[in-house]
């Protein structure tokens, strides 16, 4: 009898949870303010999408494309202001009334209005509207969507804006290369969750992935390695297969434009002075000893480093000139991490620079190197971001620090009055294992669960209110040593991308892990319809 009673209690709890899940609006990231009403707006033939400003025409078309599966033909999209006609109205409002990336979304039984002070805000309102629709709206094959789906949107009022101005996701395309269509898909997915920065890691020891017309050997030689490590570091096993690829400048322009349409700024990373083996393999004179080397075939940190001579700075400035032409981003990421100093210690050229410039050691030489690059980019109207090693030897005057070795580098930079982006490897590295399970696919190391990521707080307790203002936001990093396919990237990134999105958008006081998990279940269905290979550890 006791067992029967326990079974009934568990069954009732399960039924309650199921009913709660089906009735709760499952928006991620959770909006700042939401008030639910009664009734719903029905997407049906005859509605019109109106946009009040030319800057909204593109996203109006995107909305129409999204709604295609509801009637297999789309809807009329026209310029117009709000009226009593049934439809969806997109408009701009006085910027003083709303956050630059914020929006107001109102759904009644007769119309939907989305207002923002900028087109970006309206775009984010559309992403929220998307999540108010049944999950089948995400289906990549409209012919498989059953005609009995009720395309109803609940009556609701939402006022929403982001907590942080920098909401980033990273992708390493150097350890493994990914085609243009996958990069676009990745941008689509992060934009869906209101990320606004795509950090594109384009150069590494294992491959140079960006066409530079003045230096063709960077892609003829530097983009290709003779083999790739099999298994974890230290196995000594290699596949013996030539591997590589790169993006042409036309392809890069295409991706940058694609991201812009989704209000994502692409930040390129050109690694220096370390992680430069592929470039030196292409042009040995960039190293300190003019020795022939090969593009790296394994992972880790290599001693090869750009030599701090004038020919190297000329090369880097020429490369950056072409990078600037391709990427309108204010920020250019210059790496600065894991730069061994052994070759500088042994190089007469490097030691002469240290003596000539009155530098104390090789760490100050790295600061000199970074500062020269920063000055050049500043002269072109750009700013640098660097990994937290750029603090060593003295921080370049206007540099923004990306804190990855924990939070200490970010704390130091913020206390010095420098902008900071937090991406500590303990919580924000998506190349880590996400479950303690023998069946998990190979990863670089460690364990970083979705709950770990959701529990992360980007503003360290060590910072006071004034210092905290220098924390622009945070980022998730996807290093691809052990991700050779887009499907593996998706498995490692999702749903962790979804969890971090709420950290970056939603007020800290409104986050609640248990309720997030309930809302997340709807998003697993969306990932299914989008054919995203998301990890299933937290799926009911």
Image (tube, rainbow, N blue to C red):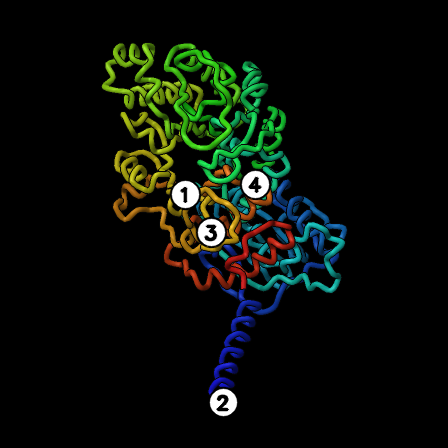
Circle 2/circle 4 CB separation < 8 Å: no
Q: Which one is in front in this view, the residue at disc 2 or the one at disc 4?
A: 2
Q: What residue is pinned by disc 2?
A: 1
Q: Are marks 3 and 1 in contact (CB under 8 Å)?
A: no
Determine the image quadrant of residue 388.
Answer: top left
Q: Residue furthest bottom?
A: 1
**Mark nearer the N terminus (3 vs 4):** 4
Under circle 3, the secondary element is loop
Query: Tag 4, which secondary structure?
Result: helix
Looking at the image, which residue is at 72% across and 51% down? Answer: 141
Q: Which mark is residue 474?
A: 1
Residue 24 shown left or right of residue 391 in the figure? right
Circle 1: element type: strand
Distance (Cα) linking label 4 and label 1? 17 Å
Name the element at disc 2. loop
User: Residue 434, labelled with which disc?
Assistant: 3
Q: Residues within 10 Å of mark 2 (few under 14, many from 20)?
A: few
For mark 3, does the 10 Å Cα neighbourhood hold few (<14), some (14 to 19), or many (20 or more) residues? many
Q: Residue 210: which numbered mark, if any?
A: none
How packed is label 4: few (under 14 Cα within 10 Å), some, or many (20 or more)? many
* Residue 290 as seen in the image, left or right of residue 79: left
């Amino acid at each position: 009898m006791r067992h029967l009673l326990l079974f009934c209690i568990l069954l009732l709890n399960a039924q309650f949870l199921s009913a709660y899940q089906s009735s709760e609006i499952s928006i991620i990231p959770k909006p700042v303010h939401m008030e639910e009403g009664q009734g719903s707006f029905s997407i049906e033939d005859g509605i019109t999408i109106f946009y009040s400003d030319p800057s909204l025409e593109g996203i109006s078309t995107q909305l129409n494309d999204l709604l295609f599966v509801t009637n297999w033909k789309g809807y009329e999209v026209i310029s117009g202001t709000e009226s009593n006609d049934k439809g969806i109205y997109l408009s701009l409002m006085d910027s003083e009334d709303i956050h630059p990336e914020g929006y107001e979304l109102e759904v009644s039984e007769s119309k939907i209005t989305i207002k923002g002070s900028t087109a970006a805000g309206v775009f984010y309102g559309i992403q929220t509207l998307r999540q108010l629709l049944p999950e089948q709206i995400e289906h990549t094959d409209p012919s498989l969507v059953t005609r009995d789906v009720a395309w109803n949107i609940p009556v609701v009022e939402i006022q929403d804006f982001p907590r942080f101005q920098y909401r980033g996701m990273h992708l390493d395309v150097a350890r493994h290369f990914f085609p243009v269509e996958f990069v676009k898909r990745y941008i689509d997915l992060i934009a869906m969750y209101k990320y606004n920065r795509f950090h594109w890691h384009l150069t590494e020891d294992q491959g140079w992935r960006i066409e530079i017309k003045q230096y063709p050997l960077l892609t003829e030689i530097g983009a290709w390695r003779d083999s790739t490590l099999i298994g974890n570091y230290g196995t000594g096993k290699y596949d013996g297969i030539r591997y590589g690829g790169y993006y042409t400048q036309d392809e890069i322009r295409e991706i940058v434009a694609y991201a812009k349409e989704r209000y994502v700024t692409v930040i390129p990373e050109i690694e220096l002075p370390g992680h430069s083996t592929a470039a030196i393999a292409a042009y040995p004179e960039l190293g300190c000893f003019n020795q022939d080397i090969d593009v790296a075939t394994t992972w880790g940190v290599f001693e090869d480093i750009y030599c701090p001579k004038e020919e190297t700075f000329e090369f880097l400035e020429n490369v950056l000139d072409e990078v600037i032409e391709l990427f309108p981003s204010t920020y250019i990421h210059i790496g600065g991490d894991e730069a061994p100093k052994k070759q500088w210690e042994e190089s007469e050229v490097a030691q002469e620079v240290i003596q000539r410039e009155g530098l104390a050691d090789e760490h100050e030489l790295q600061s000199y190197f970074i500062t020269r690059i920063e000055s050049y980019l500043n002269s072109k109207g750009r700013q640098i971001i660097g990994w937290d090693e750029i603090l060593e030897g003295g921080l370049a005057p206007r540099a923004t620090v990306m804190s990855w070795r924990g939070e200490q580098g970010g704390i130091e930079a913020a206390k010095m009055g420098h902008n900071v982006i937090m991406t500590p490897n303990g919580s924000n590295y998506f190349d880590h294992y996400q479950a303690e399970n023998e069946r998990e696919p190979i990863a670089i190391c460690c364990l970083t669960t979705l709950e770990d990521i959701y529990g992360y707080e980007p503003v360290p307790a060590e910072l006071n209110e004034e210092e905290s203002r220098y924390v622009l936001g945070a980022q998730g990093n996807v290093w691809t040593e052990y991700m050779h396919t887009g499907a593996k990237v998706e498995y490692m990134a999702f749903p962790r991308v979804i969890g971090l999105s709420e950290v970056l958008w939603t007020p800290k006081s409104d986050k609640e892990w248990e309720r997030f998990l309930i809302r997340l279940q709807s998003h697993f269905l969306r990932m299914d319809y989008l054919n995203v290979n998301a990890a299933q550890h937290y799926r009911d």
